[in-house]
């Protein structure tokens, strides 16, 4: 992409765009439509996934460089969890139009306000324990982005997972040391195919992270999705004016629903315009209860107990009310006892997960964690909207 | 036992003694010290196990012929559940002294009041769906009891259970058609031994049911456990007098702690004085959660759901509050959702049991149902008396 115009951004400066959406159905009953995954302190760390995401990005962006795009229903909760976020940087979508619209709108608003900038998009609900290693990788990706590439970060696979898409890398890029051309993106493979990918040494997991100049991103969008590009540019031009609501109400519902992967990443990769920087930091999308349990430490009985899953400190149990958790012959069990101090006993069930909330109780085999979706589907079919 | 004096009781007349004790630890958390198994409507039938036991016996005994022996702590609850029970027939033990003291005291009180009678002792917490078949067997046993035998009822085994003791029968008794001499009683065997027993055709399960004349029972006790016999006779003589409390307080704590099996059944069987009548009615002692689940009917998903486990109708859920139970890939699952209308979902766990009460949640493999005792032991060791 050496033909792209060079726009040197302020050194070391990044604008981060965090799309905060998705209910996390596979984490039911912890996550709900009204309590999506990113608003929860799933690891019992004292910070929600959204807050931890902001903590991780702020050294790169400063408070002024952090943007969050979320649904109207969650805007207040996001503002409450991120009191340092400038209100102008919280972009509320009237309705979900998929990731391309969300990210492109934020990129267009940033560019309209500040001119072309390097922006980076990271999900609000992923777990990355080593922030320093993450930021070092992002800095490498910023160099590739400045050189004109749509740059993604490839997560070093720890196994032949079938839960993620993969990125195949090609040649190293001379203009961005540490970055490689992306040969192609592939969808979630079966286990055998995944093992074959890993054997080549060229594949990494696709975590949906993108670092790119706003002018590069919007330029690609102009070519590949002209109506969508025109729509977000029109909304962005009106965003900081009295016309915002009127334009948003008129244009937003017309925007093409498409993921950034299909709109930009895949077609631009085919043109040679996407770069990948391998990231060796630990990463998890906490895709289901089994993944969540794997991120936590087992106690002396070999059981993982997660005491607190709260949106705020107010939800936390009082210290005196800790409920006993007794596990007999159940190695690998995972228990979320919930509030209210009931005793929880697990007997003869290795790898069981027990997740208790005030209105629901889930008991599952960790191996079947993905099938929680079936439970949610059945509750929806039964009209139990209050449980979704 | 043709040398025993013949005391013809009123035709078809029986006094039933129901010892109501035992917490049913293996049914935790449904049963507790303060909510023992016999006080619970475990089958969701609308009658507690104690009430069902009384219902089953009353056609043989009439209200005046039913006696219940229970601990002081449960006397009020028993009286409340059996409003037709004459207050004189509710015998409260100051402290547990095992089954021989309880049954012998009741037998002595009956004999002191009415002279020698045929009495029968049946546990308060067993399940026998076919009352008519049960009573026909008891009537056969009454004939053997009238003839002077300590008569037990042998339950036809439905498999080589290791959870019960066994009764080996010998020759048929000419003086009591349908009854057999007992060759011996044996303790709970291992599975191989149990299978060998069943192969002979001579063994049945020992359900601890005894039918015997009071004078025969107390006569054996005079010989075999003289201090215990003297003690219960002394208490019985004072029972309907102002001295009851004083005598009870003085004598009761001195009584030998021994089970009727060891005090009477085994030694008298060795003398040829015990008869057995095979009972072909269905029977279950509901010894654990797996047994309880087996007594209930599965729904269309192959899951057993027990909605109501209450002591009284007041505990029952209101009809509108029924909580959804969703089971995915979990045939043979058993769910007691408890009150409060939470949703319960079970995923990928065949044969799991989920038992929810207001203060405890038990999740276990039905195969490991007996290991619930370990949970109770651990809670006791942790000082959580309120959960026992």
Image (spheres, coloured by chain):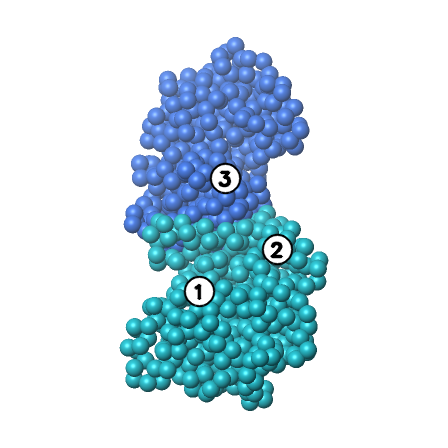
Chain colours: A blue, B cyan
- Whole-angstrom CA distance, mark 1 to mark 2, is 39 Å
Q: Along the horizontal axis of the image, is A129 left or right of B57?
A: left
- Give the SS element for disc 2: loop
The residue lying furthest to the bottom in this view is: B10
- Give the SS element for disc 1: loop
> For the point 33% across and 31% down, which residue is it?
A63
Label 2 environment density (alpha carbons within 10 Å; few <14, some 14–19, many ≥20): many
Label 1 environment density (alpha carbons within 10 Å; few <14, some 14–19, many ≥20): some
* The disc label shown at residue B332, or none: 2
The residue lying furthest to the front in this view is: B3
Residue A225 at x, y percent in the picture: 58, 32
Give the letter of the chain under mark 3: A
Q: Nearer the viewer, mark 1 or mark 3?
A: 1
Query: Are the residues at dot 3 and dot 2 in contact (C-beta closer than 8 Å)?
Result: no
Residue under label 3, please give it: A332
Residue under label 1, please give it: B258
Residue A151 at x, y percent in the picture: 51, 22
């Amino acid at each position: 992409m050496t033909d792209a115009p060079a726009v040197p951004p302020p050194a070391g400066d990044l604008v981060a765009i965090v799309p905060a959406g998705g209910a996390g159905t596979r984490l039911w009953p912890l996550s709900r439509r009204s309590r999506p995954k990113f608003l929860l302190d799933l690891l019992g760390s004292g910070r929600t996934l959204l807050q931890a995401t902001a903590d991780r990005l702020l050294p790169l962006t400063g408070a002024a460089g952090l943007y969050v795009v979320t649904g109207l229903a969650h805007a207040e909760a996001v503002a409450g969890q991120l009191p340092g976020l400038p209100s102008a940087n919280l972009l509320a979508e009237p309705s979900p139009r998929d990731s391309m619209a969300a990210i492109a709108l934020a990129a267009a608003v940033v560019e309209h306000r500040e001119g072309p900038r390097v922006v980076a998009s990271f999900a609000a609900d992923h777990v990355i324990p080593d922030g320093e290693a993450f930021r070092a990788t992002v800095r490498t990706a910023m160099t590739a982005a400045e050189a004109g590439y749509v740059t993604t970060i490839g997560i070093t696979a720890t196994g032949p997972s079938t839960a993620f898409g993969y990125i195949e890398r090609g040649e190293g890029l001379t203009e961005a040391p540490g970055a490689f051309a992306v040969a192609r993106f592939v969808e979630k493979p079966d286990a055998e195919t995944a093992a074959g990918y890993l054997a080549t040494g060229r594949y990494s997991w696709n975590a949906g992270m993108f670092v790119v100049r706003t002018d590069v991103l919007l330029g690609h969008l102009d070519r590949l999705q002209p109506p969508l590009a025109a729509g977000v540019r029109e909304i962005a031009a009106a965003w900081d004016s009295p016309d915002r609501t009127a334009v948003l109400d008129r244009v937003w519902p017309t925007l093409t629903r498409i993921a950034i992967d299909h709109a930009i990443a895949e077609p631009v990769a085919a043109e040679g315009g996407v770069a990948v920087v391998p990231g060796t930091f630990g990463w998890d999308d906490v895709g289901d209860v089994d993944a969540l349990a794997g991120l936590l430490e087992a106690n002396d009985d070999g059981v993982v107990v997660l005491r607190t899953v709260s949106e705020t400190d107010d939800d936390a149990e009082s210290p005196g009310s800790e409920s006993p958790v007794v596990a007999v012959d159940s190695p690998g069990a995972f228990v979320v006892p919930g509030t209210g101090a009931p005793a929880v006993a697990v007997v003869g069930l290795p790898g069981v997960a027990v997740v208790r909330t005030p209105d629901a109780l889930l008991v599952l085999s960790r191996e079947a964690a993905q099938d929680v979706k079936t439970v949610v589907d059945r509750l929806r079919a039964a009209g139990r909207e209050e449980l979704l």
